[in-house]
Amino acid sequence: MKKPFNLVLTFSLASLIAITALMVGLSWLLGNRLESRLLARDQVLIHAAIQQEVGEELDEGMSFETIYQDPEARDHILEEILLIPGTKGVEILDTSGKVLWSTDSEKIGTERNTELLAQVLEGKSAIEFKDEDHTALSSSEEKSADWKADTGLYVPIVHQQEILGIFEIHRNNSQLRKQVKTLQTEVYWFCAAFGTGLYLLLMCIIIPAARIIRSQHSQLSSTAESLKSVNEELRRTQKELLQKERLSAIGEVCGAVAHGLKNPISSVRSAVQLLGTLSLSTDKREEITEDILIEVDRLAKRLNDLLNFIRPFDLNAQSAHLADIVTSAAASLKWKAEEEGIQLQTDLPGTIEPVSIDRSLMEEAVLIVLGNAMDASSPGQTVQCRLLSTKGRQTIVIQDEGNGIAPDVLPRVFECFFTTRSQGVGLGLALCKKIIELHQGKVTMESQEGKGTVVYLEIPSAGDPSAGGPDATKKSE
């Protein structure tokens, strides 16, 4: 198995990068948010303080003009305003932006053309960044000022829902900026501590998980090696079993051949020995010679059955009528049937369509079943061969009136080398089954003791792809 990736190293690097980026972004966002909130709070507090001081004078019946013209009233208000941290100067403006009074006497009578006046005249305070000469900065310069410049805070004086004038407070932001920087630093440290804690927590989770994964991988590797060893052992065992199976099959074949040839060879040997006896008559010699020929024919038949079973078949399928196959097979056994006194009957309709088969192999299968039926019959009994046609199937039915087959024996009749006859080899029906299955058909047998046996050879009809016959296989290819 492949070595697993280093989970701890990969996750630690990935989480470190992700948490660092998250904390940097969060601290920047919180710092800027804190900065804007402090500035807004400072602006609100100053606005409220000035409005309260001036409002008290106005509530006592003093006019706005008297406030900035009466030194006593003006100085009282200025003392409270100058106590605000960072305050450098104060100017009092009318609603048109004209300076009515200033701590810098040179500015009295000048006018403010700032765009913030419209906002102030709506009753809202406003901040304007200024350079060291108290000149207002442009919007782009304000963005780059970063609180390094002074500010001008415009506070409207509202009395009985009427704006009477404007107080402009000139301030130095160093102290406020220091407070902001201090709070921002605290935010950065908090985010760093939080990110570090989060990183350590994740590592506390991932390290045990990595150990578990390594352990599981080790176990899987060990299991894979074991399975590989077991698989190799199974292949060796399978190979040995196949070899033993082949040897067993060869042994069965050799045993069957030896058993089937032993008696005929002994008979031939005895007959040949008798032929060497000079005292035999001509008739006796002819009788012995005939017996030798019979035994030799029997040997040839058994060897031929064995060779037919073990040889591979090359199916030479072609269109043919099963009725012609049955007729040809019956004609081959005609003389044997007459010699043994058995009636061989055929019932073959002439309108059944042809099928795709190998003529020689199919005729051999029919001959095997017909021959067995005749061997099981006694003189005077009938062997009947019929041809039936159903949807997608054609069936050759061969029925005899012999003694039948016992129920415990019937399931084994198609096994190789199984036979109930002393002179049989047990390959005929196995060869027949092999031929029929090669044609995508099937062989079945029904039998009752004392009533005879029926064998069904079913073959798929030609041109029926669903039947799976040889021609259908070719067409599907």
Image: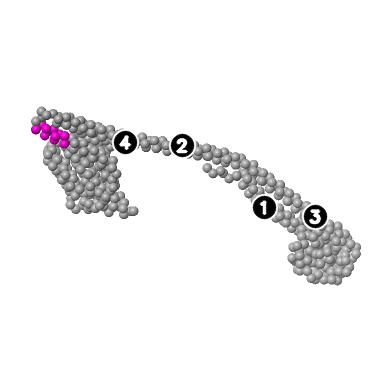
* Element type where label 3 sits in the image: helix
Q: Which residue is mark 4?
A: 249
Residue pictured at 46% horizontal, 36% vertical: 230
Give the vertical position of 187 relative to 207 (above or below). Answer: below
Give the residue type that dot 1 points to: Ala
- The mark nearer the N terminus, 4 or 3, is 3
Residue pictured at 84% horizontal, 71% vertical: 110
Total label count? 4
Residue pictured at 85% horizontal, 61% vertical: 88
Give the residue type that dot 4 points to: Ala
In space, the residues marked 1 and 3 are separated at their CA atoms by 26 Å
In space, the residues marked 2 and 3 are separated at their CA atoms by 76 Å
Q: Which residue is mark 2?
A: 230
Examine the rendering and report whether any part of residue 395 can be seen. no
Q: Position of residue 279 (x, y in %)?
A: 10, 28
Q: Is residue 239 left or right of residue 6?
A: left
Question: For this rendering, which residue is in front, 469 or 164?
Answer: 469
> Closer to us: mark 4 or mark 2?
4
Q: Which residue is mark 3?
A: 178
- The mark nearer the N terminus, 1 or 2, is 1
Q: Which residue is mark 1?
A: 21
Q: Residues within 10 Å of mark 2 (few under 14, many from 20)?
A: few
Q: Residues within 10 Å of mark 4 (few under 14, many from 20)?
A: few
> Closer to us: mark 2 or mark 3?
2
Q: Quadrant of residue 143?
A: bottom right
Give the residue type that dot 2 points to: Val
Residues under numbered marks 4 and 3 in contact, where contact means CB atoms less than 8 Å apart: no
Q: Which residues are magenta?
A: 282-294
Residues under numbered marks 4 and 2 in contact, where contact means CB atoms less than 8 Å apart: no
